[in-house]
Image (spheres, grey):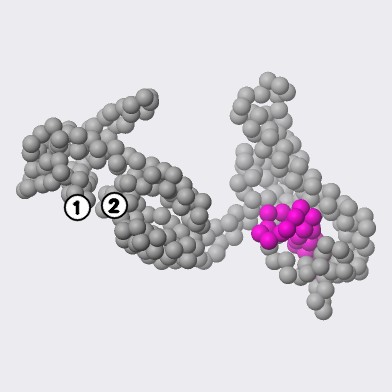
Amino acid sequence: MTFEETIIFYNPEHADEFTLKLKKSGFRAKTKRVSTLVKDTICTGRIDDFISLFNEEKKKYDNGSDKTDVQALMTDMYSEIIDELELRKNRLSGFFGSAHPGDCISDIPGFNGCGGWTEAGDDEPGAENDEERGNKTLFHLLNENGLLESGSGKWILKNTAEPGEIITAVPSDMMLEASSQEKRSRYNINTIINVMSGVETHVTLPPEFSISAEPEMIDQILNEYDVDEESILKLKENGYIKSLLAEKIIEYLKEKERTPFDELFGEMKSLKFTIENTNDEFRFDLDEKFLKDMLGEMKKMDLIKSKGNHFRSA
């Protein structure tokens, strides 16, 4: 159906909750569970190599006080990444300065319960403060570099290393323009693509919702639920454009008593118009089937009337 749009939910409970809300508001949505593969891409390499790479990239945009807005943005982004890597390096340096091989890190203040830390990173949910988040990052850097061993519920430091030589991971989207194969090879940075099986829930929205939903309402869906952002963006764009086209059809039909399909199609197939108070111009290239389907749905929504092959406004 031409007015239907689909939102992809990654959490099935969120999808069920959303469809129930729609039902209470008078909209009936269709849901479908879809088996899929989920991809998570990270880049791994030595901390010092990452810092060198990002410093090289930063220099391309660092033109003193004469930077453009784009150059300033790129400089700031690379600076933030470098600062984070330097922070990891400093945490490792401080730890290795006081800990020795054979030490039980489970007894070190701040590392209590470290055996239950299964998610790495400073942004881990549930970390209460900067110190706890930092300790969790440090624990995972040690463990993933083979510097820890576990036994009897405790974690023992097997060895130390030069902080800059420690292997760390950076999400692929943080590589920005440094993601080329040539640059990654030059700095011995590897790309790891983790592929997992998963399930998505596709919620197909009824035409009445898609054509009437306000942008603020759609943004609220994005903020409340774990959904695919691209499907939300498509809903906003398509819903807006289709509502504009429906308005133009209704405007044309209001000027006529009864309009045959061929005449209406002749007016709408290459429709173009500018949005008031903007420089935005819409140009359409429609085929007969699309317009017929659209008119059929508009009739079901009581937006227009038809008899035979003729149409009029409701």
Instruction: Please state which amino acid type lies under the numbered disc 1.
Output: Lys
Residue at 68% in and 20% down: 66
Count of numbered badges drawn on the protein: 2
Mark closest to the chain's N terminus, 1 or 2: 2
Q: Position of residue 8 (x, y in %)?
A: 43, 57
Q: Is residue 57 visible?
A: no
**Left or right, 54 with reference to 312:** right
Q: Residues within 10 Å of mark 1 (few under 14, many from 20)?
A: few
C-alpha separation, residue under disc 1 versus residue under disc 2? 10 Å
Q: What residue is rendered at 19% in x and 52% in y?
A: 300
For this rendering, which residue is in front, 55 or 96?
96
Check if mark 1's residue and mark 2's residue have beta carbons within 8 Å.
yes
Which residue has dot 2 on it? 207
Vertical order, 244 against 173 (above or below)? above
The residue lying furthest to the bottom in this view is 152
Task: Identify the element where label 2 is drawn.
Answer: helix
For the C terminus, the quadrant is top left
Q: Is 141 in the magenta?
A: yes
Assess whether residue 31 is covered by the magenta stretch. no
The quadrant where residue 233 appears: top left
Magenta span of residues: 122-149
Q: Which residue position holds label 1?
A: 300
